[in-house]
Image (cartoon, helix red, strand yellow):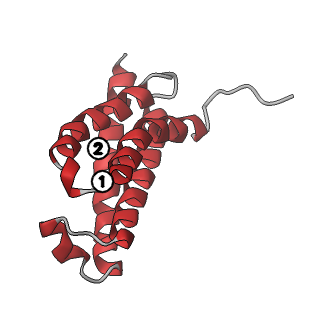
């Protein structure tokens, strides 16, 4: 149980760290991105970048969750659900500021990407394929 909790917390920390680092990359790579953050007036390329950033962070966080808690099949699900729960009210409040496809892509992909990231992490003590 302790490793599961540590995995969940580690996954949340990893998501935050990865998305923060990648956001610095978006600021450097896309002209005007930093200014657009204040107004939320993102170009389509900026929106795509934000979605890719969140996808990479979710995938990596799922892998970190499983790395810390390799025996817990539920830890990536729980970590992803927590991130989803944190962002759901934000997206509801911003619903009219972004297109529906943007909200749905972000919200519907978080948990599956956590789970896939966790599933693809090599399991310790996994029996060798015959």
Q: How many marks?
A: 2
| Callout 1 crowding tier (Cα within 10 Å): few <14, some 14–19, many ≥20 | some
As drawn, the label of residue 78 is none
Residue 83 vs residue 59: left or right?
left
Kindly give the residue lying farthest to the right in the view shown: 130
Nearest the eye: 26 or 99: 99
**Residue 77: image location, x then y, percent:** 42, 28
Disc 1 element: helix
Nearest the eye: 8 or 77: 77
**Residue 81: image location, x then y, percent:** 34, 30
Nearest the eye: 77 or 68: 77
Quadrant in the picture for the C terminus:
top right
Kindly give the residue lying farthest to the bottom in the view shown: 31
Residue ID at (60%, 40%): 120
As drawn, the label of residue 17 is 1
**Residue 71: image location, x then y, percent:** 52, 22
Quadrant in the picture for the N terminus:
top left
**Residue 52: image location, x then y, percent:** 43, 59
Residue ID at (29%, 83%): 31
Nearest the eye: 106 or 117: 106
- Vertically, is 16 above or below 49? above
Residue 3 vs residue 71: left or right?
left
- Vertically, is 49 above or below 78? below
Q: CA distance from mark 1 to mark 2?
A: 6 Å
| Quarter location, residue 51 | bottom left
Asked whether the residues under the numbered discs 1 and 2 touch, taking CB atoms below 8 Å apart as contact, a structural biologist would say yes
| Callout 2 crowding tier (Cα within 10 Å): few <14, some 14–19, many ≥20 | some
As drawn, the label of residue 13 is 2
Disc 2 element: helix
Residue ID at (37%, 48%): 106
């Amino acid at each position: 149980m302790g490793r599961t909790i540590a995995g969940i917390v580690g996954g949340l920390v990893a998501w935050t760290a990865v998305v923060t680092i990648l956001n610095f990359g978006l600021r450097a790579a896309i002209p005007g991105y930093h200014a657009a953050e204040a107004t939320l007036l993102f170009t389509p390329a900026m929106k795509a970048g934000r979605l890719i950033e969140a996808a990479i962070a979710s995938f990596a966080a799922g892998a970190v969750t499983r790395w810390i808690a390799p025996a817990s099949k539920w830890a990536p699900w729980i970590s992803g659900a927590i991130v989803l729960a944190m962002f759901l009210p934000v997206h509801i409040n911003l619903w009219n500021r972004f297109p529906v496809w943007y909200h749905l892509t972000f919200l519907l992909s978080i948990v599956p990407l956590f789970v896939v990231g966790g599933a693809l992490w090599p399991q310790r003590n996994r029996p060798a394929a015959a």
